[in-house]
Image (tube, rainbow, N blue to C red):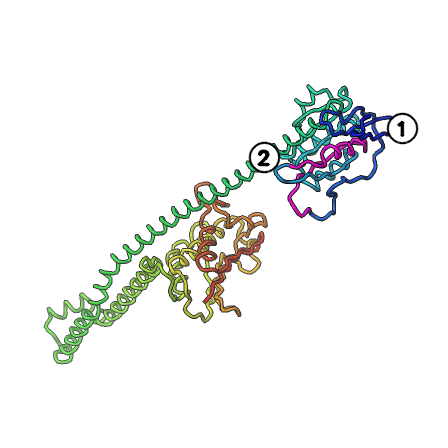
């Protein structure tokens, strides 16, 4: 043998593996096996529980029950690098060890896999485990066999998801380097494509979310414009009526005073006046007329309050951040939803319990925050509607559908707004997804899955606050908004 060559022998089997400076020298001259021993590579070590390498490396798993195969492979590849990254080797001498290593090292780039080990198809079982159970389709797998009769190439390549099939006796050093570099290039390209796909998926999700938010924002803007327009149209005639009530009441009081004066000076009027007075029930009229004016005044004041609430909810002219009364926004939202709180054929009226704390004015985007109140309160009403069929077991605290709203100041100079319902509640899996765009538990066509996602964005991104939710099946749901004063 030339002095340039190295020969590793096994005295029991006379198997030999040759590594030479000449790239055409075969590195596996025979494959009769050797006894497995615990061994790591001659360069950087990569075994379970070892510290991570300081630089990025290509992990190669050698799976063979012959330790000489491990040594010869390292001799052939130890000086190889690809894309300026060195190779590091993991060693398994059985299918069981291979399964453990690939599970603990999912970033393995290449597996050089023997077929016949503890069983005739042990290597093929490893392939099935990697692809079918671990769902690892990135790692490249090269079958290296010294007994092709046990695993015919034609059937193996069709039935198993491998990337190459090689006879050990045909591999020279250069051929082994070539197949390894080709496999590493393929693995690297797969990672790049998957990273690009992930980036594209994230970009698409972000685009869809942004588009949905723009659509929702446009809907809210249209709603605000409609509400503001209706409020304006109602406000004009209401002001006209309210303004004239004072004068009308003054005139009527003067006329009643005149009638009383006539009655004092002419206690016995002519028959025609007596007949009219009896037909109109003059005493009752004089007593009831002031009450009618009080009722009309209360009604017009109620309309004015509704108009004010509608205008406060829309706030189209207040896009910037400014100090606002949080309670005013909540009350305005409740007014908009008043018709949904009333009793219907399927359930009793929804009680709203308000526990308002003493809050200062809060700097916020009032229109956006009102939208958050609208989304959360609407969802609470929906939850109570969905729980109607099981009413009576949906709550441990209330016997009737109830929404509880509580506000307070926390010790960190934040305003806390708690909105809770005693509906059916949510499972843990649902709770984890409620702020995801397009996720909804409502029937198809009943919800877009954007309300809570947009609310989260308004509270967290616009106001630098927090929006959290706690819930459990049968124990209702509570949303907590906290924003800085």
Residues 337 and 387: in front is: 337
Q: Quadrant of residue 166?
A: top right
Spatial CA distance of label 2 from label 1 is: 43 Å
Disc number for residue 190: 2
Please tell me whether residue 291 belongs to the stretch shown in magenta.
Answer: no
Tag 1 residue: 12
Q: Quadrant of residue 294?
A: bottom left
Residue 269 to residue 437: above or below: below
Query: Could one spot residue 475 in this view of the protein?
Result: yes
User: In the rendering, at what x and y percent does residue 194 appear?
Assistant: 56, 37
- Residue 354 relative to residue 191: left or right: left
Residue 230 to residue 98: above or below: below
Q: Residue at x 70, y 30 (%)?
A: 127
User: In the rendering, at what x and y percent does residue 405 appear?
Assistant: 47, 62
User: Few, some or many C-alpha atoms within 10 Å of disc 1 (few <14, some 14-19, many ≥20)?
Assistant: few
Query: Could one spot residue 443 in this view of the protein?
Result: no
- Residue 128 relative to residue 423: left or right: right
Tell me which segment is drawn in magenta. 53-81
């Amino acid at each position: 043998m030339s002095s340039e060559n190295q020969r590793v022998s096994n005295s029991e089997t006379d198997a030999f593996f040759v590594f030479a400076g000449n790239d055409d020298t075969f590195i596996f001259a025979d494959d009769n096996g050797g006894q497995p021993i615990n061994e790591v590579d001659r360069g950087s070590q990569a075994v379970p529980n070892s510290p991570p390498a300081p630089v990025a490396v290509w992990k190669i798993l050698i799976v063979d029950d012959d330790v000489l195969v491990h040594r010869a492979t390292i001799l052939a590849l130890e000086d190889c690098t690809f894309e300026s990254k060195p190779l590091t080797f993991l060693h398994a001498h059985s299918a069981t060890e291979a399964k453990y290593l690939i599970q603990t090292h999912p970033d393995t780039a290449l597996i050089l896999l023997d077929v016949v080990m503890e069983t005739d198809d042990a290597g093929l079982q490893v392939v099935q485990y990697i692809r079918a159970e671990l769902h690892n389709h990135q790692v490249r797998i090269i079958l290296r066999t010294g007994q092709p009769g046990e695993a015919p190439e034609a059937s193996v390549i069709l039935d198993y998801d491998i990337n190459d099939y090689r006879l050990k006796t045909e591999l020279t050093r250069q051929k082994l380097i070539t197949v390894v570099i080709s496999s590493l290039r393929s693995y690297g390209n797969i990672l790049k494509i998957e990273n690009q796909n992930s980036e594209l998926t994230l970009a698409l999700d972000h685009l869809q979310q942004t588009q949905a938010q723009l659509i929702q924002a446009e809907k809210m803007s249209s709603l605000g414009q409609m509400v503001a327009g209706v409020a304006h149209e109602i406000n004009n005639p209401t002001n006209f009526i309210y303004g004239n009530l004072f004068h009308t009441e003054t005139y009527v009081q003067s006329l009643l005073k005149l009638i009383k004066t006539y009655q004092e000076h002419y206690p016995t009027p002519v028959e025609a006046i007596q007949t009219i007075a009896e037909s109109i029930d003059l005493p009752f009229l004089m007593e009831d007329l002031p009450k009618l004016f009080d009722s009309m005044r209360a009604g017009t004041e109620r309309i004015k309050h509704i108009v004010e609430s509608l205008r406060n909810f829309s706030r189209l002219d207040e896009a910037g951040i400014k100090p606002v009364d949080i309670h005013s926004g909540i009350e305005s939202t409740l007014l908009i939803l008043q018709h949904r709180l009333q009793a219907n054929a399927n359930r009793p009226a929804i009680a709203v319990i308000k526990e308002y704390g003493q809050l200062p004015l809060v700097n916020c985007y009032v229109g956006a925050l009102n939208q958050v109140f609208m989304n959360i309160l609407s969802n609470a009403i929906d939850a109570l509607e969905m729980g109607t069929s099981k009413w009576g077991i949906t709550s441990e605290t209330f016997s009737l559908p109830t929404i509880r709203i509580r506000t307070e100041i926390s010790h960190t100079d934040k305003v806390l707004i708690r909105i809770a319902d005693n509906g059916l509640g949510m499972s843990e899996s649902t709770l984890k997804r409620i702020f995801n765009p397009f996720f909804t538990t409502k029937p198809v066509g009943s919800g877009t899955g954007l309300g809570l996602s947009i609310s989260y964005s308004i509270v967290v991104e616009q106001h630098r606050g927090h929006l959290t939710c706690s819930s459990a099946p049968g124990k209702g749901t509570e949303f907590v908004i906290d924003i800085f004063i």
